[in-house]
Amino acid sequence: MSAAKIAHDSTQHEHVPTGWRRYVYSTNHKDIGTMYLIFAMVAGIIGSLLSFAMRLELQEPGLQFFADGSGYNVFVTAHGLIMIFFMVMPALIGGFGNWFVPIMIGAPDMAFPRMNNISFWLLPVAFILLLMSMFVEGEAGSDGVGGGWTLYAPLSTSGHPGPAVDYGILSMHVAGISSILGAINFITTIFNMRAPGMTMHKMPLFCWSILVTVFLLLLALPVFAGALTMLLTDRHAGTPFFDASMGGDPVLYQHLFWFFGHPEVYIIILPAFGVISQIISTFSRKPVFGYLGMAYAMVSIGFVGFVVWAHHMYTSGIGFNAQAYFTAATMVIAVPTGIKIFSWIATMWGGSISFKTPMLWAVGFIFLFTLGGVTGVMLANAGINHVLHDTYYVVAHFHYVLSLGAVFAIFAGWYYWFPKITGYTYSEFIGKTHFYLTFIGVNIIFFPQHFLGNMGMPRRYVDYPEVFSAWNFVSSMGMYFTILGLVTFFIGIIHSFVRKEKAGNNPWGKGADTLEWTLSSPPPFHQFNVLPKIK
Amino acid sequence: MYFSGKLKTVLFATLVSLGILLEPDLLFSQQADQINQWQIQLQNPASEHAASVVWHYNAITYILTAIVVFVLGLLVYCVVRFNEKSNPNATKTSHNAFLETVWTLVPIIILVVIALPAFRLLVNEYSPPPADVTIKATGSQWYWSYTYMDEDFEFDSVMLDKTAIKDGQPYLLAVNNDVVVPVNKVIKVLITASDVIHSWAMPVFSVKMDAVPGRLSSTWFKATRTGRFYGQCSELCGKNHAYMPIAVRVVTQEEYEAWLKKAKEQFAMKEEQKEIKLSDTSSVDSQENGIYIYI
């Protein structure tokens, strides 16, 4: 394809803004994508530090680092919110989505470049608000929001008289606006700006995954915003939505929250599916197996994801019929998820697989996501959930699918697109060391947590009885491997920028057949001034 | 010869694992009352319902493990067989209608096999036999209060701090006043909260029910053996969430009656409390198990 050459020629006449203006005023999807990635890294470091503190505390029974439970609860809350809203979503949707959706569909930029700018710049504001909440009074006599990322009323209303929760609510509102604007932008871009010949059914699966994700965002976030606003008016305007003493109902909040909260977990994992599909296909040197099945599996996961929310509420006192329905509906999700897992394996089957770093992360993803997925099938059974609900079994489950699943996909995508984004190669040795350290570390952390859950250890506990100490100690040991892995990750980045080895347009060979590999590395400031024609 | 020996080993191992599969209790059997610190399975059940939950949990764990091992096997095979050295030329296969149908239908069958028997657990839980003893548990920041609805007393159950622990009681689990119930009797527990949401959990009975302010949820259990069992608050409720354990002491009928007599004196109620209690009972009696009402 001659698109690269055309694009290269055209840059000769471009005005490229320089200095801080290039970023603060940016309307360029690649610059904004880069800012999202850097932002995700900063938030990721802070979120990880919070979790390290939690595992240090839990390494032994007794209180070692936290004065009391409220400080610990604040860390639990901030860790969850930061990792979800300020690390995974910005990295996968804002970062990789912004960078590669326009390029993959052959568009010069996003549909609304200025809205893209405000989408990004709202995020640091939201993040700062959330960090500020940790330093103002929440629960009487202590600082910060300690209500968990779910912010259940009445703990987040009458249970937190201080203004910390208000900072948290404002932070989530701002982050939500940012995501909704981003969602509108992606939908418009994908529906209207595909290059000639790029039909919906030719679109790379990563674009499909982002398309489904942003629809979920657009439909789920307003419900969250509503629930947050109701919390706010309950706190300050005397409304009784969630106040039982005035006829309200705390369970109403849970329904509203999880109507958003469950699609939210698919918002996190669907773009990861997309990234993994691109990588598996590239390194197996084969087209994705069952492309249509893969695309519509994501669409159906998106649909079903909206009708299963109360499986987070099996112990809240909802009745038998509701629990029976939500058990059945939740089980259904395993079917499209299974289709995806087996299609990835079938893509590898018969391939000529080169095990470069991104592929290692992708294969690791498939295994860990399967492991986390099957424990989800266990938890979906309401009758069994009543013994496992709110125990460490649940913690293990959602960390396997999200913190191992989604984060492995982020690292896979990072190594996959690093040469394209920066123009430099990365060191395979450092990348693979990073993978093995992280793989070993996270499994040592989270696998024993299944056992803790079986024994009955509840979540969000700052201190635990002696009998839970053995597996907690093992779990904390895994943290040290993971820290080493994280350090290796940053060493790898520094190493690449110091070495400055040019990557070339396509370092992955003929398996990499999406449009971004036809451009230079890094791509020109504006690509596709003449639209590519897709055959 | 070498191969036949290897084959025998594989065959033997397969048979053994099949045997374990058919009888999950073999691997998961456990007699001790107290959990031990390297335990990997659910707590030893103390009611028929909980035993049934444990059985289903174990059986499903086998199915899930088999799925993970199967996927892992496929991945390992791909890594070994289809790496670029072993297989320099990739095929171009990207469709196989038969395979795609199989991996849609087979998971559906597995899910039905998992879900249908497990539905019985839910049905069982929501078909309570008539209650012999009814106790109301109220969660407050950060302790539980128990009202014996058929009697005239209530008491608070507060965690013992380190200095008050005696007789090898477990710290963070032991409380000043246990809930005492008779063995082999149906105990109905009404659960509510006075401030924020708490959750009344008792793993050996496979019972967990949120204590929601303004709602009166109910659950039940029928203990099959005596002993002291522990649970912990299972819904984040603020600073001392980790410090409001639940202790249930299951005793024989005679011991229960003796305790009841003593408790009535020790926790005697004032007149105004009685009135509140009576109004609660009348509104609760007509309710099905697990269905809430507003109080």
Image (cartoon, rainbow, N blue to C red):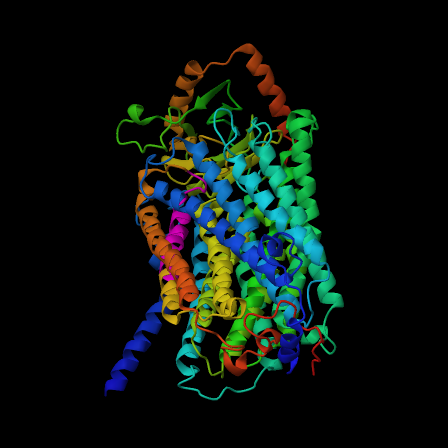
Q: In this view, does B61 lie above or below A296?
A: above
- Indicate whether residue A440 is drawn in magenta: yes
Q: Among all residues in the image, which is located at the extreme right?
A: A192
In terms of depth relative to the viewer, which is nearer, A353 or B110?
A353
In terms of depth relative to the viewer, which is nearer, A8 or B243?
A8
Q: Where does residue A114 sit, x and y in percent of width and height?
A: 70, 55
Residue A497 visible (yes or no): yes
Q: Among all residues in the image, which is located at the extreme top?
A: B271
Q: Residue at x 43, y 51 (%)?
A: B54
Q: Among all residues in the image, which is located at the extreme left?
A: B1
Q: Which residue is drawn at 63% across and 34% down?
A: A250
Q: Give the range drawn in magenta.
A: A438-461
Q: Which residue is drawn at 48% across and 37% down?
A: A74
Quadrant occupied by the C terminus of chain B = top right
Q: Where does residue A305 sit, x and y in percent of width and height?
A: 64, 56
Q: Where does residue B255 sit, x and y in percent of width and height?
A: 37, 26
Q: Is residue B114 above or below residue A340?
A: above
Residue A323 visible (yes or no): no
Q: Where does residue B13 sit, x and y in percent of width and height?
A: 31, 72
Describe residue A135's horizontal placement relative to residue A15 as left or right: left
Q: Is residue A77 above or below residue A105?
A: above
In terms of depth relative to the viewer, which is nearer, B290 or A365?
A365
Q: In which quadrant of the rendered view does residue B18 lie?
A: bottom left
Q: How many marks?
A: 0
Q: In which quadrant of the rendered view does residue B58 lie?
A: bottom left
In terms of depth relative to the viewer, which is nearer, A35 or B261?
A35
For the stretch drawn in magenta, the main secondary structure is: helix
Quadrant occupied by the N terminus of chain B = bottom left
- Indicate whether residue A323 is drawn in magenta: no
